[in-house]
Amino acid sequence: MSIKPKQISVGGMHVQILRKGIKNLHLGVYPPNGRVRVATPFRVSDEAVRLAVIGKLGWIKRQQAKFAAQPRQSLREMVSGESHYFLGRRYRLRVIECEGSPTVTVRSRFIELRIRPGQGKTRREAVLERWYRQQLKGLIPPLIEKWQPILGVALAAWGVKKMKTRWGTCNAEARRIWLNLELAKKPVQCLEYIVVHELIHLITRHHDERFVATLDKHLPQWRAHRAALNAAPLSHSDWSY
């Protein structure tokens, strides 16, 4: 059980408070823009949260500085020569105008987009996004099949969608997870980490000791994957979340 999040200001910094049925206070700084969230037991007052945040201000600022220093792309214009990412690698976009159905193909160092003449940025983005979605939907099922028996969980459904603030979400009651479309641009190890992360939420809803212990046991390198995910170049849309 949880209640609607509220927001307080600490030294001009916005802090989201989410009260849940948990035992301990958890403070986190999240990509892409360093938002601060505190998950706390119901009994903890706003003033106690404020003091906890003040006590961690130095650490919070360091985390936010890391996110601010990440390489990030400018707004994509969908023209030949631009950099685009797929599974953590950078490719140059090559736009080829021709008749026929639009296609996307990876060729050496290029992502080749074939599209009818006169199609503008919006249509080109839609074609490339559809391709990213198709690629991601091909990568996810083997990971789910691999990790369900390891973790002893059974997923009812999964999907891919654009998300503004999370790499993934889990609805434990429905046994359904959603994965962020942007993961198609990140290293595949990062995708696996997020799949495992969300599947563990079928065991425990919170990022508590049991959650961390399960990650440590089955994916001991998860912290490196998380760091790689947070260090990967941000798209323009990532940064504007």
Image (cartoon, rainbow, N blue to C red):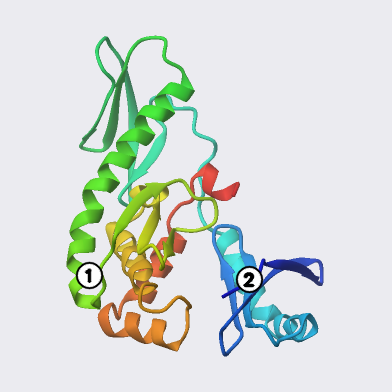
Residue drawn at x 34%, y 48% is: 184
Residue drawn at x 42%, y 46% is: 161
Q: Amino acid at mark 2?
A: Arg
Residue sitting nearer the eye, 142 or 5: 5
- Sort mark 2 into few (<14), some (14-19) or many (20+) by Cα contacts within 10 Å: many
Q: Amino acid at mark 1?
A: Gln
Q: Compared with residue 101, is residue 148 higher up or lower down, i.e. above or below?
A: below
Residue sitting nearer the eye, 5 or 115: 5
- Sort mark 1 into few (<14), some (14-19) or many (20+) by Cα contacts within 10 Å: some
Please provide percent x and percent y for residue 128. Answer: 36, 32
Residue sitting nearer the eye, 199 or 135: 199
Mark nearest the camera among 1 and 2 is 1
Determine which residue is flagged by label 2.
Answer: 37
Please provide percent x and percent y for residue 185. Answer: 36, 48
Residue drawn at x 40%, y 83% is: 212
Horizontal side, residue 218 vs residue 163: left or right: left
Secondary structure type for disc 2: strand
- Give the numbered dot on residue 148: 1
Secondary structure type for disc 1: helix
Please provide percent x and percent y for residue 67. Answer: 56, 62
- Give the numbered dot on residue 78: none
